[in-house]
């Protein structure tokens, strides 16, 4: 199995372009990934990569070996799937990505129940508020918030999750009165309010990032536009 593990690391390094990304994908350190590549090169007696400061490019030998190695790994995956089909028990690995807040509150909480039902399936959950390249990272299922751009990928709406504007309570009160103020002046004018006392104002706000856009009212009020799931609200 060690040789197959080395091959699997090699394939992911070719596909992702560097050891760090391949290591994260396979849940090993860059040092371990590097050692496995060295073991493979020693076994084959050739250099598989031309190394630069930022990227690893496969050599001619590496390109030829990648083609065969990918076929081997795909064949193993298909063989395991065929065995699983005969046994009636699904098995394998599912790579899932989701925004941080949504993933923590709604996705991660359901993984234990999923694992109880399908114990032979490993779920690799990656939570990030950045757009993950689904094809490059080999993601099987991706959860997204907001309007999705046209894509050849299959998409399905599963719930509605409104956005809320969050900020210190005295900022909210100023906003409702139509006055945008600096936090310091707000605190001085109303010392009874605690700047750390945060709440949520429901509103219609279009923003591309979780932190809001620069010209949006949220920025002027030192608040943030976030999915309701980030604030503990239930999505429908």
Image (spheres, rainbow, N blue to C red):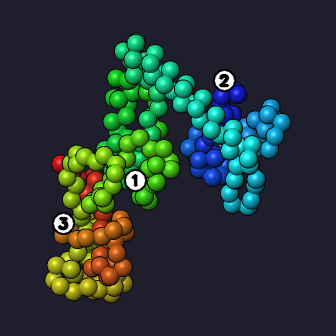
Cα distance between the residues tagged 2 and 1: 34 Å
Mark positioned earlier in the residue sequence (2 or 3): 2
Tell me if I can see residue 166 in this picture: yes
Pointer 3 local density, CA inside 10 Å: few below 14, some 14–19, many at least 20 = few
Q: Position of residue 115 (x, y in %)?
A: 39, 27
Q: Which mark is residue 1?
A: 2
Pick the front one: 142 or 217: 142
Q: Which mark is residue 100?
A: 1
Instruction: Tell me the residue that label 3 is attached to.
Output: 202
- Residue 218 figure quarter: bottom left
**Identity of the residue drawn at 46% across and 15% down:** 83
**Identity of the residue drawn at 27% across and 79% down:** 217
Camera-near label (3 vs 1) is 1
Camera-near label (2 vs 1) is 2
Element assignment for label 1: helix
Q: Position of residue 42 (x, y in %)?
A: 82, 36
Q: Position of residue 153 (x, y in %)?
A: 34, 48
- Residue 6 figure quarter: top right
Q: Residue furthest top?
A: 87
Pick the front one: 114 or 185: 114
Circle 3/circle 1 CB separation < 8 Å: no
**Identity of the residue drawn at 79% across and 38% down:** 41
Pointer 1 local density, CA inside 10 Å: few below 14, some 14–19, many at least 20 = some
């Amino acid at each position: 199995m060690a040789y197959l593990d080395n091959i699997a690391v090699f394939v992911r390094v070719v596909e992702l372009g560097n050891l760090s990304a391949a290591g994260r994908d396979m849940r090993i350190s860059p040092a371990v990934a590097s050692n496995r590549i060295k073991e493979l090169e020693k076994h084959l007696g050739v250099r598989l990569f031309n190394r630069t400061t930022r990227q690893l490019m496969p050599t001619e030998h590496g390109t030829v070996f990648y083609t065969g190695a990918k076929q081997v790994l795909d064949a193993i995956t298909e063989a395991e799937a065929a065995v699983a089909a005969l046994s009636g028990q699904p098995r394998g690995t599912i790579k899932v990505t989701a925004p941080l807040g949504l993933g923590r509150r709604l996705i991660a909480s359901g993984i234990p129940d999923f694992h109880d039902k399908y114990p032979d399936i490993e779920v690799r959950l990656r939570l990030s508020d950045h757009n993950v390249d689904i094809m490059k990272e080999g993601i099987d299922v991706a959860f997204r918030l907001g309007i999705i751009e046209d894509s050849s990928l299959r998409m399905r709406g599963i719930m509605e999750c409104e956005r809320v504007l969050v900020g210190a309570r005295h900022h909210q009160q100023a906003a409702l009165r139509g006055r945008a103020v600096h936090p310091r002046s707000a605190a001085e004018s109303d010392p009874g309010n605690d700047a750390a006392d945060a709440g949520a104002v429901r509103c219609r706000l279009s923003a591309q990032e979780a932190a809001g856009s620069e010209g949006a009212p949220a920025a002027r009020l030192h608040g943030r536009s976030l999915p309701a799931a980030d604030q503990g609200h239930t999505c429908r």
